[in-house]
Image: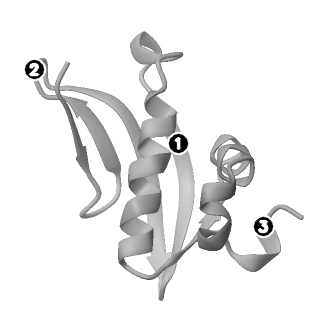
Amino acid sequence: MNLIFSATRSPATLTDAEHGIVVSRIDFRTEGDTFFLDYLWTNPEFRGQGHARTMIDHFADVVAERGGRITPICGVARAMLQSDARYADLLQPSLRPR
């Protein structure tokens, strides 16, 4: 499977290029330098294979490149981001793990 990540606008998608199937997506919006991660979704056929983590990783890279901060609205995304120290500096200060 050849995966392509795109985050030029919402939704950010992870696509199986060979079959043209959306594997995972993030719905987001921006206000200033804040990226509100509204929803993280993975196609049921591809769940349990780490694609949500791949989406979070790529999304975090884009936010970091743009000098932004993430405010996760989606509970699953929030749990993933707060449980990984790599993302602490990207989270809004009030959301950082203590």
Q: Residue at left 66%, top 44%?
A: 80
> Where is residue 12 shown, x and y percent of the image?
33, 51
Residue at the image point whose x is 52% and y is 42% from the top: 40
Label 2 belongs to which residue? 18
Task: Using residue 13 as the reference point, say whether residue 17 is left or right of it.
Answer: left
Q: Position of residue 94 (x, y in %)?
A: 81, 75
Q: Amino acid at mark 2?
A: Glu
Percent x, y of residue 65: 36, 74
Which quadrant of the figure has residue 10?
Answer: bottom left
First along the sequence among labels 3 and 1: 1
Q: Which residue is mark 1?
A: 40
82 relative to 46 in the view: left or right: right
Horizontally, residue 69 falls left or right of residue 92, namely left
Picture quarter with the N terminus: top left
Q: Amino acid at mark 1?
A: Leu
Q: Is residue 17 above or below residue 9?
A: above
Q: Dot 3, crowdedness within 10 Å: few (<14), some or many (≥20)?
A: some
First reached walking from the N terminus: tag 2 or tag 1: 2
Question: Does 53 sit above or below residue 79?
Answer: above
